[in-house]
Image (tube, grey):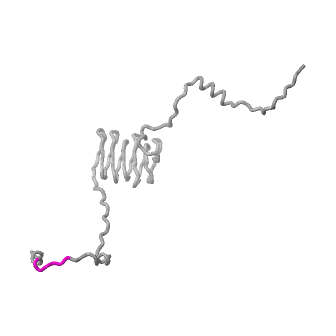
Amino acid sequence: MWKSRKEDPKPYTPPSPAAPVASSINAAIPAREVRPVESPKMDNYRSDVAHIGKSVVVKGELSGSEDLYLDGEVEGSIELRSHSLTIGPNGRVKANVSAKEVVIQGKVEGNIRGTDRVELRKSAVLNGDISTQRIVIEDGAFFKGSIDIQKPEAKPEPAKVSAATAPAASASIPTPVTSSAQAPLLDRN
């Protein structure tokens, strides 16, 4: 009555729980492109920028060897010798600042030393002196203090070879001979 069939026994594999759920979700919700979250304030800055958020308060000396975006509060001193500092619109700084480039959008009380450039955006409020090579002040920025424009540092010229330090070079250079006719012209008083 019953006929037995010979079938290859297949091991039982339970269905993946994500597969039926995902297919039902995909049918109900249209697909969207997923992009990383980008802050509009940071879109022009490099990715290796340290960030201090608006709820962070720092009291004391702040120094570093990378660029810094500061949107919090700092009291003391900030030193980023060969890097840039950007003080965001929520930034509140009561400190002397020393950095290669300084961009201010928030409030600063203290002196600014930007070895390359200082920029005051329209929302900036600065009470203090500025010392820099280049400066940009947007219309609407508030600034009370003085500006000292520094000349770019001159690169040292290579040392000239003198006869005392290079005897081989001095042997090939002829020495000028002055005639007796030229002597009276040099001796005029």
Quarter of the view holding residue 143 = top left
Q: Is residue 96 visible?
A: no
Left/right of residue 87 with respect to residue 138 in the rendered view:
right
Quadrant containing the N terminus in the rendered view: top right
Is residue 83 visible in this depiction of the protein?
yes
Q: Position of residue 66 (x, y in %)?
A: 45, 51
In the image, 20 versus 12, the foreground residue is: 12
Q: Is residue 93 magenta?
A: no
Q: Quadrant of residue 164?
A: bottom left
- Quadrant containing the C terminus is bottom left
Using the image as rendered, state which of residue 136 and residue 45 is in the foreground.
45
Magenta residue span = 176-181
Q: Residue furthest right?
A: 1
Residue at image point 52% right, 31% down: 33
Picture layout, residue 49 above or below residue 12: below
Q: Position of residue 151 (x, y in %)?
A: 28, 56
